[in-house]
């Protein structure tokens, strides 16, 4: 079907607006956290896969870290295993860990890899167990309002925090034209697997790779005020104020903290974006306005 003059002009305008951003981002690394809540239907997943392939095609190095919380909860429900959360983290006993590995390392990871490859990309699926990609230790959460970790924190089971990332392997894959798709399962020196929050993995991956951007896709428009207004241009003091007054709470806490850690450790900017919006990654990267909540140092 041919385009009429107005449609053709719209296409040309979009491409022209995107050109300086394509030139600016060519050759740089962008870590995208693809949340399980952004995988609500096949059209959304296909839109995301096309975005990632386009990023690679124009010279960027996208690295995908995916979650799968809703998918894990669904299977736990079918198995009659109760889902419990503490401080925004899933409490993970041995039975839950088995389900986490099955869903993240198998079902979700392979689905994302397959879609990217169908769209013309060259994706490879990894978990933290592959080549010791994500080395981890047990996470002890101290305070929900601070996302702090110390030896006196609460034990949430086989939930881990990252001690090291084999970022050289990820970099080599990117340089070889591959799109790494990473499931957030870590491992310690004894071979024990750990469930790690995907936002935290994405943030740490962005730090180790010194990525230009960290994009966190979720099922909200971004960080919103208590009146529902979208907030952006946030930094450390502003975010601490929002945590103290309860505006940022629950599952948003680890998401915001990992974004803050990333931008305070060399990542240029982090963006919390609604993954349900078609082509949300491209809108964020290639338009002047962008979308979602930007967090900077």
Image (cartoon, rainbow, N blue to C red):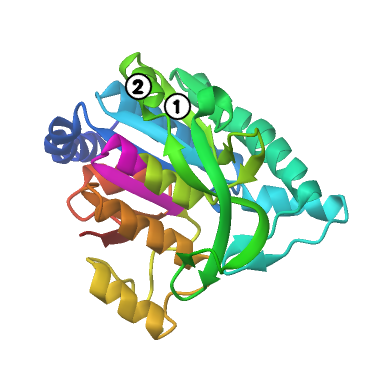
Residue designated by label 1: 180
Range drawn in magenta: 206-217
**125 up-or-down from 67: above or below:** above
**141 up-or-down from 56: above or below:** below
Q: Position of residue 193 (x, y in %)?
A: 65, 39
Residue 211, magenta (yes or no): yes
The CA span between labels 1 and 2 is: 7 Å
Determine the residue located farthest toward the right in the rendered image.
80
Q: Position of residue 269 (x, y in %)?
A: 24, 52
| Residue under the image location 84 percent in, 56 percent down | 81
Answer with the quarter of the image where residue 205 lies: top left
Packing grade of label 1 (10 A; few <14, some 14-19, many >=20) is many
Q: For mark 2, give the secondary structure.
A: helix
The C terminus, quarter of image:
bottom left
Residue 50, magenta (yes or no): no
Q: Position of residue 152 (x, y in %)?
A: 56, 69
Q: For mark 1, give the secondary structure.
A: strand
User: Is 128 placed left or right of 147 in the picture?
Assistant: right
Asked whether the residues under the numbered discs 1 and 2 touch, taking CB atoms below 8 Å apart as contact, a structural biologist would say yes
Residue designated by label 2: 174
Q: Would residue 125 be seen by someone viewing this image from the given angle? A: no
Instruction: Depth check: give the residue in front, 132 or 42.
Output: 132
Packing grade of label 2 (10 A; few <14, some 14-19, many >=20) is some
């Amino acid at each position: 079907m041919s385009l009429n003059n107005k449609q053709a002009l719209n296409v040309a305008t979009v491409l022209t607006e995107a050109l300086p951003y394509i030139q600016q981002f060519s050759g740089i690394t962008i870590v995208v956290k693809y949340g399980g809540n952004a995988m609500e239907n096949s059209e959304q997943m296909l839109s995301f896969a096309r975005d990632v392939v386009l990023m690679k095609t124009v010279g960027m190095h996208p690295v995908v870290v995916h979650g799968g919380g809703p998918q894990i909860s669904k299977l736990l429900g079918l198995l009659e295993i109760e889902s419990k959360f503490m401080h925004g983290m899933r409490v993970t006993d041995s039975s839950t860990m088995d389900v986490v590995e099955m869903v993240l390392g198998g079902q979700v990871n392979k689905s994302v890899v397959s879609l990217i490859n169908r769209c013309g990309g060259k994706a490879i699926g990894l978990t933290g167990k592959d080549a010791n990609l994500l080395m981890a230790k047990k996470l002890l959460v101290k305070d929900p309002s601070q996302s702090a970790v110390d030896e006196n924190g609460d034990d949430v089971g086989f939930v881990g925090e990252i001690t090291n990332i084999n970022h050289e392997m990820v970099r080599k894959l990117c340089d070889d034209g591959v799109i790494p798709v990473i499931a957030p399962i870590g491992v310690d020196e004894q071979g024990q697997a750990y469930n790690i929050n995907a936002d935290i993995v994405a943030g740490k991956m962005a730090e180790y790779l010194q990525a230009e951007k960290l994009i966190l896709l979720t099922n909200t428009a971004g960080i919103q005020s208590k009146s529902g207004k979208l907030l952006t241009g946030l930094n450390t003091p502003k975010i601490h104020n929002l945590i103290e007054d309860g505006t940022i709470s629950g599952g948003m806490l680890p998401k915001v903290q990992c974004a803050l850690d990333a931008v305070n450790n060399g990542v240029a900017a982090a963006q919390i974006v609604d993954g349900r919006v078609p082509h949300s990654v491209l809108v964020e990267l290639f338009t002047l306005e962008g979308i979602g909540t930007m967090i900077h140092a």
